[in-house]
Image (tube, rainbow, N blue to C red):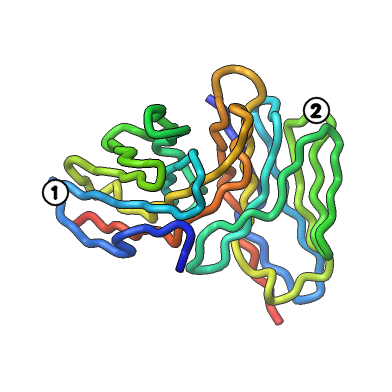
Amino acid sequence: DADVTQTPRNRITKTGKRIMLECSQTKGHDRMYWYRQDPGLGLQLIYYSFDVKDINKGEISDGYSVSRQAQAKFSLSLESAIPNQTALYFCATSDSRWRDDTGELFFGEGSRLTVL
Amino acid sequence: GQQVMQIPQYQHVQEGEDFTTYCNSSTTLSNIQWYKQRPGGHPVFLIQLVKSGEVKKQKRLTFQFGEAKKNSSLHITATQTTDVGTYFCAGTRAGGTSYGKLTFGQGTILTVHP
């Protein structure tokens, strides 16, 4: 089984619908991240969390929200999906004792979202 | 905000040729990481460089971190078809309130023709 699991792996939805992408990990890491990947743009950070009570906005948080339900779970929500949120979404985890060093990121398999 | 630029965006090589991708940051970095993403896959960590001027090798891959800690490169010697994929650099800004935010470059897509 994968250490970082994302569900769903693929989702097609319509404009205005609420969507939740879920991420769970068995690595025991405190830090979790949500990235968005678009062709030619690399990976852009949406939200990141150092622990259950510490959640921070990334580069492109507008239109997204997150919930850290437990150390092992980090969910990304699109309250009202729009077509330009069509992308590949990755969850990642890391473990570092230093606040300014992420350490190695371990990525999930990705969730491909299409908003019509 | 911090920007990490990576060039080239695409590179086509014949198997056996060398390949280099370059990464430049608008700000000084505390460290830089490199990832590889195979087609249809997820990014996988390759290495992290921390020291100014650091050079590390992994078999046919050579990674360098610039003296000013604002640029980095990945060089692959004698490419193989298994090297196909997208290579990303990702940096953490030194100081400030970045608090471990890893900013990715746009990636270089490598195609290797047999």
Q: Residue furthest bottom?
A: B114
Q: Residue at x 44, y 33 (%)?
A: A51
* Residue A89, position as x, y percentages in the image: 39, 52
Q: Residue at x 63, y 30 (%)?
A: A98
Residue B68: mark: 2
Q: How many marks?
A: 2
Vertical comparison of B30 with B82: above or below = above
Vertical comparison of B96 with A28: above or below = above
Residue B46: mark: none
* Residue B71, position as x, y percentages in the image: 74, 37
Q: Amino acid at mark 2?
A: Ala
- Judge left or right: residue B39 versus residue A19: right
Which of the image's four quarters has the N terminus of chain A?
A: bottom left
Which of the image's four quarters has the C terminus of chain A?
A: bottom left
Cα distance, mark 1 to mark 2? 47 Å
Task: Mark 1 vs mark 2: tell me if same chain.
Answer: no
